[in-house]
Image (cartoon, rainbow, N blue to C red):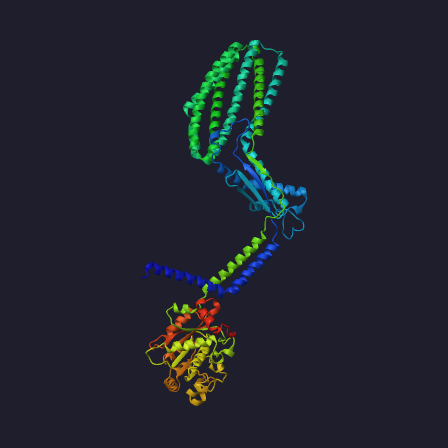
């Protein structure tokens, strides 16, 4: 016993086989348009490949790394230096794609174009409009900037810190030029960005340097004028020593103020940047700045340093060594405590910071410590200066004015020297701060084109053409609602009597000489098909009266019903039965043309008593086959066919003939066929393959199916076995070859 799984598997295999067969059939039916569309795609692709402009590609490679600061500074938190590297490179790629970089490149291209005076070396930046083609004028700057966005590709090599800048242009020189300009523009922008903070410090110190120099010159002039005016040129040793001490402290105080101001500005800038990226983290760092323990340590360090300076100012050389050792020991101890606290704090806050802002957070922390230290130092030095100011004001009145001017000159001079030292240091810092970009491989002028790949274009054109061809076939089939195979009829629970092949000239529209194929070529395949139809009609009503009157109709005109009527009648005549063909198509009669006879006198002439029965009954060239033409076209065919006299006429024919085949008009167009279907023994609907719509067939079957029960099935006419329907074609192949294997001569359509 076969299991249920085996049955399901067999059904599934059958369905898959049927689906594949349908696809093959569809392709074979539409092979001509598929081939034409495919060839069109191939020709177009070949034409494009031949005429396509060569495109050259140039590439420059850059190595990116995180900024490491200048050579005078150690990396900030080196243990975190590798975090977020991929995101860093992604950010840098966006900078490379930015409008600013493209603007620099555009300016460079415009400048080099004007300097070189070789327009033939450029293509992308040239205006190719008809008006400007001869003069080789440049595009507008904003147009070049927009164009660069689409012509320059910037990509990171997977897993590496290498970024490739690729440029494509019809000019090999221009491709290399743009790639190198891109790299240079980015390096310049990157270097400016990395040096931004130290540049700001340098610019601030340069301004202070000029101001202090002017103050020094002014103070020296004032001192000189006072001395010349009052004749006082020297101070006492005590006054001079006091002035030296107070000027030292005042210079240190002002220097500390400069450090305090620089640190304050840098901290504000860093906090502003951090605020944009992470406002919550910025607020958290504010709490670190106000932590009492850190502030106390920094204040104690500043106090000890100030006291150390005061003690050293009046100590002997022997005392200075001892005092320096003692104070440095205490200061070092406090600094170690401060550094430990900061290190712990840094580790905690950086561990919770996003990778992309760890460096920025570390910079904010370091700058915050510098700012607090400078502020505490400035505060302590201010106190020391105030103490010395009190002593200074106790000098004799006669020398006080000279002392003040001398003090001012000494203070400004020392401050100027300190500012000059800091400026030179900032200048070195700026110049020593490297960019984080290194050119690994400069773009070189390519010698071979990168595009187009002509072989690939032709291959793609062939594939696209074939794809469009197949798409056309499937779309056409999707919207095609015509009957194509006997399966299309059977799938709608309609009986298929037979299918007449479109082989051998049964199409009256193409070759009427062989329209009566049963008489002209009795050994042809269509003749065999009509004999098969005859047999199926005879056995369509077993157990009932013999079928003598057969109605042939169709859904629409030009579906071959007249050809079927005549050949079916001829196939019956070949069995020694007396057969008559009655042309009841009073709309467009054609039976007389098949037999090459006149239409009148005919049935209607006899019906109205104008001629006798013997005059309308005509014998054909085939034995036992007779035919009756329509005669004069009446104005009321339906009334004639539905009259009692018509029934009487059919009864008389039944007495004389064995088989009566009636050719009638299309059942959808008029009611004639529907009326006749109630008077005959059998009704057959003729449909034409690839012409008759399924909806029309179903409607026709509905009209012919009534209580009389005369409708016996559908005949599929003009069915092409060779269109890919292998399950049908095998019968054609078998019958189209003789017993000795030689092919029969086929009749052309």
Snapshot quadrant of residue 409: top right
Of residues 472 and 16, which is closer to you in this image? 16
Question: Is residue 169 placed above or below 368 in the rendered structure?
Answer: below
Q: Residue shown at 65%/52% (left/top)?
A: 131
Would residue 155 be visible to someone looking at this image?
Answer: yes
Of residues 369 and 677, which is closer to you in this image? 677
Q: Residue 34's x, y, as percent?
A: 52, 62
Snapshot quadrant of residue 399: top right
Would residue 610 be visible to someone looking at this image?
Answer: no
The residue furthest front is: 740
Asked whether, in this view, residue 255 is left or right of residue 580, the answer is right
Q: Residue 406's x, y, as percent?
A: 58, 15
Q: Residue 744's x, y, as percent?
A: 50, 74
Question: Is residue 365 placed above or below 306 in the rendered structure?
Answer: below
Snapshot quadrant of residue 58: top right
Of residues 327 and 616, which is closer to you in this image? 616
Q: Residue 304's x, y, as percent?
A: 47, 17
Q: Quadrant of the N terminus?
A: bottom left
Question: Is residue 611 placed above or below 697 in the rendered structure?
Answer: below
The residue furthest left is: 1
Of residues 96 and 131, which is closer to you in this image? 96
Question: Is residue 533 placed above or below 222 in the rendered structure?
Answer: below
Asked whether, in this view, residue 10 is left or right of residue 395, the answer is left
The residue furthest right is: 117
Total numbered circles: 0
């Amino acid at each position: 016993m076969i299991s249920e799984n085996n049955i399901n598997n067999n059904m599934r295999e059958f369905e898959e086989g049927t689906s594949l067969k349908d696809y093959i059939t569809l392709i074979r039916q539409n092979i001509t348009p598929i081939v034409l569309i495919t060839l069109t795609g191939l020709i177009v692709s070949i034409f494009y490949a031949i005429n396509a402009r060569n495109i050259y590609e140039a590439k420059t490679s850059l190595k990116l790394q995180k900024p490491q600061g200048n050579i005078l500074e150690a990396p900030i938190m080196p243990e975190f230096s590798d975090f977020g590297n991929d995101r860093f490179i992604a950010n840098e790629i966006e900078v490379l794609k930015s409008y600013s970089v493209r603007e620099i490149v555009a300016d460079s291209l415009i400048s080099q174009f004007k300097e070189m005076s070789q327009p033939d070396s450029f293509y992308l930046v040239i205006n190719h409009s008809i008006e400007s083609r001869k003069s080789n004028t440049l595009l507008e700057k904003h147009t070049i900037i927009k164009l660069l966005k689409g012509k320059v590709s910037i990509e990171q090599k997977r897993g590496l810190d290498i970024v490739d800048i690729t440029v494509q242009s019809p000019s090999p020189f221009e491709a290399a030029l743009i790639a190198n300009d891109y790299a240079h523009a980015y390096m310049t922008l990157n270097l400016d960005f990395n040096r931004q903070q130290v540049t700001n410090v340098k610019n601030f110190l340069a301004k202070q340097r000029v101001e202090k120099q002017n103050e020094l010159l002014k103070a020296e002039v004032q001192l000189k004028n006072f001395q010349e005016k009052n004749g006082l040129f020297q101070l006492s040793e005590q006054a001079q020593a006091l002035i030296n001490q107070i000027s030292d402290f005042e210079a240190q105080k002002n220097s500390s103020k400069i450090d305090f101001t620089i640190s304050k500005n840098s901290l504000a800038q860093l906090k502003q940047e951090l605020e944009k990226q992470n406002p919550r983290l910025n607020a958290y760092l504010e709490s670190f700045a106000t932590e009492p323990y850190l502030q106390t340590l920094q204040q104690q360090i500043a106090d000890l340093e100030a006291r150390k300076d005061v003690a050293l100012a009046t100590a002997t050389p022997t005392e200075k060594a001892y005092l320096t050792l003692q104070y440095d020991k205490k200061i070092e101890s406090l600094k170690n405590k401060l550094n430990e606290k900061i290190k712990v704090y840094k580790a905690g806050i950086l561990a919770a910071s996003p990778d992309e802002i760890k460096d920025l957070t570390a910079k904010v922390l370091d700058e915050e410590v510098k700012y607090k230290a400078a502020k505490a130092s400035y505060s302590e030095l201010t106190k020391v200066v105030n103490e010395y100011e009190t002593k200074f004001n106790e000098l004799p009145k006669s020398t006080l004015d000279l002392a003040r001017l001398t003090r001012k000159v000494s203070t400004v001079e020392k401050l100027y020297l300190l500012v000059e030292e800091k400026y030179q240091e900032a200048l070195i810092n700026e110049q020593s701060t490297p960019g984080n970009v290194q050119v690994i491989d400069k773009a070189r002028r390519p010698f071979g084109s990168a595009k187009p790949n002509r072989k690939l274009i032709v291959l793609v054109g062939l594939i696209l053409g074939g794809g469009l061809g197949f798409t056309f076939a499937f779309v056409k089939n999707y919207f095609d609602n015509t009957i194509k195979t006997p399966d299309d009829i059977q799938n709608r629970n309609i009986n298929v009597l037979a299918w007449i092949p479109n082989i051998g000239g049964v199409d009256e529209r193409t070759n009427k000489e062989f329209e009566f194929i049963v008489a002209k070529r009795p050994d042809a395949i269509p003749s065999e098909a009509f004999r098969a139809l005859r047999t199926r009609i005879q056995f369509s009503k077993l157990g009932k009266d013999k079928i003598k009157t057969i109605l042939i109709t169709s859904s629409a005109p030009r579906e071959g019903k007249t050809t079927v009527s005549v050949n079916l009648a001829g196939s019956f005549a070949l069995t020694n039965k007396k057969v008559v063909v009655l042309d009841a198509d009073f709309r467009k009669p054609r039976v007389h043309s098949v037999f090459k006879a006149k239409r009148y006198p005919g049935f209607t002439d006899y019906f109205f008593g104008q001629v006798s029965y013997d005059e309308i009954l005509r014998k054909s060239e085939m034995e036992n086959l007779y035919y009756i033409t329509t005669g004069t076209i009446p104005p009321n065919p339906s009334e004639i066919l539905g009259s009692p006299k018509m029934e009487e006429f059919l009864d008389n024919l039944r007495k004389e003939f064995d088989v009566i085949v009636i050719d009638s008009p299309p059942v959808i167009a008029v009611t004639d066929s529907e009326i006749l279907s109630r008077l005959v023994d059998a009704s057959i609907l003729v449909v034409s393959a690839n012409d008759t719509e399924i909806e029309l067939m179903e409607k026709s079957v509905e009209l012919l199916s009534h209580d009389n029960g005369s409708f016996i099935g559908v005949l599929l006419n003009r069915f092409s076995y060779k269109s890919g329907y292998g399950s049908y074609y095998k019968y054609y192949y078998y019958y189209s070859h003789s017993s000795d294997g030689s092919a029969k001569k086929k009749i052309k359509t």
